[in-house]
Amino acid sequence: MNLPTAHIERIKDLGYTDSEARFLYIVALFSGYFTLGQFLVFTGSRYGKRPTSFAQKVLKQGHATVRDYMRRGSIFHLFSRTIYGQIEKDNLRNRKKHSFDFMRTRLLLLDFILANQELAYFETEQDKVSFFCGQLGVSKDFLPAKVYVGTSPSQPTIRYFVDKFPLFLAAPLSGAPPVVTFSYVDSGFEAASSFASHLAAYQGLFRQLNSFRFLYIGAKEAYLQKAEYCFRSLVRRPLESDVSSEILHYFQIRKKWDNHEYVIPVTADLEFLSEARQRFHGDRFEALYRGWRLGELGDRELRVEFSQLRPDRAVFFDTYLLNGHSSPLAVASGHGDGCMKDTDHPWRHGSRHPEGDAKLLGA
């Protein structure tokens, strides 16, 4: 992680030490919330004068608020525009108040960041958009997006990567070149459908990439295997299927839509239709669709037409367990403040595309 010296110096000018300034920069950028336990992990210190002085300083200057949650510990919210302004990010939504669920997830996210500071993260929305659209040539239409309606409904704001989960470049296995790595942070209190919904939001982008890795970050080991199964079912299998099956499926749904056969719209079909229209467009596909619909081209002939077109992708999936995580919003902590943890977090288990492994290893 590259911490801009100029921004760190500006925070220090507010009366913070170098380590305090660096910690506040990371909190502002990735979380907005923190515990003194996480400050201790970052600085390598123990409970005593140092964390007490830091807590008093950040509260006295009005840069953060603190709340005690059911006597389980205290959570600080870094909200001051002064701090965010010093790092030229005063528009980050981390300044806003959020739900307990959001806070739980952000604390776990911060645990991951603190344990993996060596990674090269894409820090902001613009950094991510520039990478995919500028460097990889992906259209914005395929990026995960959310529309916000402001005071003027006619001028909505489109925001990308609003989940703000860690996104970085890293080698999927030893000796391999780095690939873009997406992630999902599960605090252990999310609904089972949340992960599936997250993957669905990224499907369009996944299809535009030749190689990528997905990292599931969790606080409960019991969820890791379920997450892998969900990813394999919703992402890997569809991406590894032959293109002819997808085109035939697209034609079948499109025909039903054109014939007004949907009395009650099927959400999954309509989402697939919308995505497929973007992927399979052009004169060639339109001519094939007309011929297939008129019965001039059968299913078998259509499959033969595209049977040799198989996706050339290397898809990786790994899980990451944050051992000993003890958020004040989750379980009681013996220290009162919580979030003291073992910072040695190996990748617990992972699964990879076998053909992708050989390709990345130069086989």
Image (cartoon, rainbow, N blue to C red):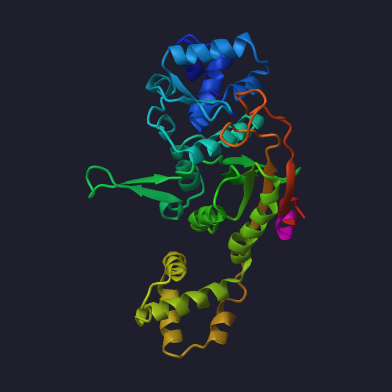
Name the foreground residue: 334 vs 110.
334
Q: Residue at x 53, y 17 (%)?
A: 21
Residue 78 x, y percent position in the rendering: 46, 24
* Numbered disc total: 0
Name the foreground residue: 134 vs 197.
197
> Relative to 41, does residue 322 appear above or below in the rendering?
below
> Relative to 113, does residue 162 appear above or below in the rendering?
below
Name the foreground residue: 87 vs 336.
336
User: What type of secondary structure mainly makes up the magenta span?
Assistant: helix
Q: Residue at x 59, y 60 (%)?
A: 235
* Residue found at the very far bottom of the displayed protein: 295
Q: Quadrant of residue 287?
A: bottom left
Q: Residue at x 72, y 50 (%)?
A: 350
Residue 67 x, y percent position in the rendering: 48, 25
Can residue 287 be seen here? no
Q: Which portion, as a residue range, is magenta? A: 352-357
Q: Residue at x 56, y 41 (%)?
A: 167
In which quadrant is the C terminus drawn? bottom right
Residue 190 x, y percent position in the rendering: 55, 48
Can residue 39 be seen here? yes
Residue 168 x, y percent position in the rendering: 58, 40
